[in-house]
């Protein structure tokens, strides 16, 4: 199992739910139990949002529902379809761009969908499940296939399941990426105090 | 302490890190230990992002640094200044709109700042700290005060600290909101299968 857990090499200790979340492309074929899958969306529900507008929506399909699984997959770019087709669950997130309380534009719609998605992924991690989010989707195709109304917009794709054997991925870029080191820019490069670009004492190395 | 923990009334069990995160407006005056504060940004660092672009930036100030604390506070709308001034730490998030790998527009910049912010808030919860995020900020003022460059944009404000006594808030809306029930729309209203608006079997009540 050691190759299916890829804890972040955090510079200082962080909660293990956060360090153990990652984005696999290889998944076990076994289904995600519906009751467990349900909790991922319950977790998303409790994310924070501007004016509590909760602008997040999800379109989900499990492999057992082959027609709808195919329709979600068709909204991913081809590169992502090639590996995501082996996940037991796929989904799309959708943002609502209008505020519910006054119909104005919600500047934070994508931001708050992101908060819900991150929360969903961490709840998955708590259950041994992982979520690979994809920017590479076809929003116009999603609108057409699922009848997403004006003022709503598909945001991202998701492959959801138990992490599988990286050797099931084709040799090359995909397999290398699955097994290589996890990388992020240092905290000192993005936590500032006083003016833009000035590292905060809190984030100094 | 019971009035300082407001676990979400989740419909099905979710990880307690997620159910125990909330957005207080009353904070204890005691500082957040710098080593603990550091971990919040380390957690944000390990969020997922499109092309691993990590488009998140933070401008932070602690109350001990009164000049910079004031400057962050000045970027909040007046309503938020009135209560956030009592938090021991304030911050702004900033999004980078250009992809690092090719300079193209990052459609998911706000989304991924949201993922980092949600992750940061959950790491805080793990330490007994809470984060109140604010949509109500003045992005143009933040640009001016902190010299935020073109292609970057202030996204949201943060008040960070240990939750305090709700009775320190003025009577009325603020105190009522701090002590009232936590509310969200049901999962059945935002998790669909097959077509827009059709509740997924996974989310059925």
Image (tube, coloured by chain):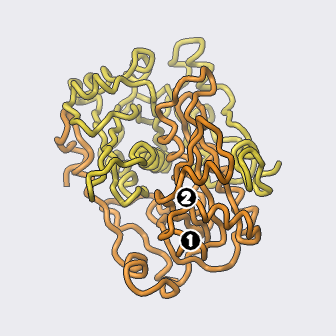
Chain colours: A yellow, B orange
In the depicted structure, whether residue A83 falls above or below residue B163: above
Q: Nearer the viewer, residue A83 or A30?
A: A83
In the depicted structure, whether residue B204 falls above or below residue A68: below
Query: In the rendered view, does A139 fall on the left or right side of B193?
Result: right
Residue A20: image location, x then y, percent: 59, 44
At 27% across and 22% down in the image, what residue appears? A70
At 41% across and 35% down in the image, what residue appears? A160
Residue that lies at the very extreme toward the right in this rendered image:
A205
Query: In the rendered view, does B188 fall on the left or right side of A53?
Result: left
Residue B163: image location, x then y, percent: 56, 75
Q: Nearer the viewer, residue A100 or A38?
A: A100
Q: Which mark is residue B84?
A: 1
Label 1 or label 2, whichever comes before in sequence order: 1
Residue A92: image location, x then y, percent: 34, 34
Secondary structure, mark 2, is strand
Query: In the rendered view, does B185 fall on the left or right side of B121?
Result: left
Please report, as a chain letter, where disc 1 is located.
B
Around disc 2, counting alpha carbons within 10 Å, would you say few (fewer than 14), some (14 to 19), or many (20 or more)? many
At 18% across and 34% down in the image, what residue appears? B195
Residue that lies at the very extreme toward the top in this rendered image:
A171
Q: Mark 2 highlights which residue?
A: B157
């Amino acid at each position: 199992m050691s190759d299916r857990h890829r804890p972040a090499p955090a510079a200082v200790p962080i909660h293990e739910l956060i360090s153990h979340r990652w984005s696999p492309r290889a998944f076990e074929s076994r289904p995600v139990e519906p009751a467990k899958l349900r909790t991922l969306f319950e977790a998303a529900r409790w994310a924070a949002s501007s004016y509590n507008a909760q602008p997040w929506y999800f379109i989900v399909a499990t492999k057992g529902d082959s027609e709808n699984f195919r329709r979600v997959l068709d909204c991913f770019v081809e590169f992502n379809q090639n590996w995501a087709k082996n996940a037991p669950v796929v989904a799309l997130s959708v943002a609502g761009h209008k505020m519910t309380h006054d119909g104005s534009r919600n500047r934070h719609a994508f931001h708050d969908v992101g908060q819900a998605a991150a929360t969903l992924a961490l709840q998955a991690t708590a259950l041994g499940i992982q979520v690979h989010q994809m920017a590479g989707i076809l929003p116009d195709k999603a609108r057409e296939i699922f009848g997403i109304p004006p003022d709503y917009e598909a945001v991202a794709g998701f492959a959801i399941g138990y992490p599988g054997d990286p050797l099931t991925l084709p040799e090359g870029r995909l397999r290398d990426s699955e097994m290589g080191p996890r990388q992020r820019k240092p905290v000192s490069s993005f936590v500032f105090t006083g003016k833009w670009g000035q590292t905060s004492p809190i984030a100094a190395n």
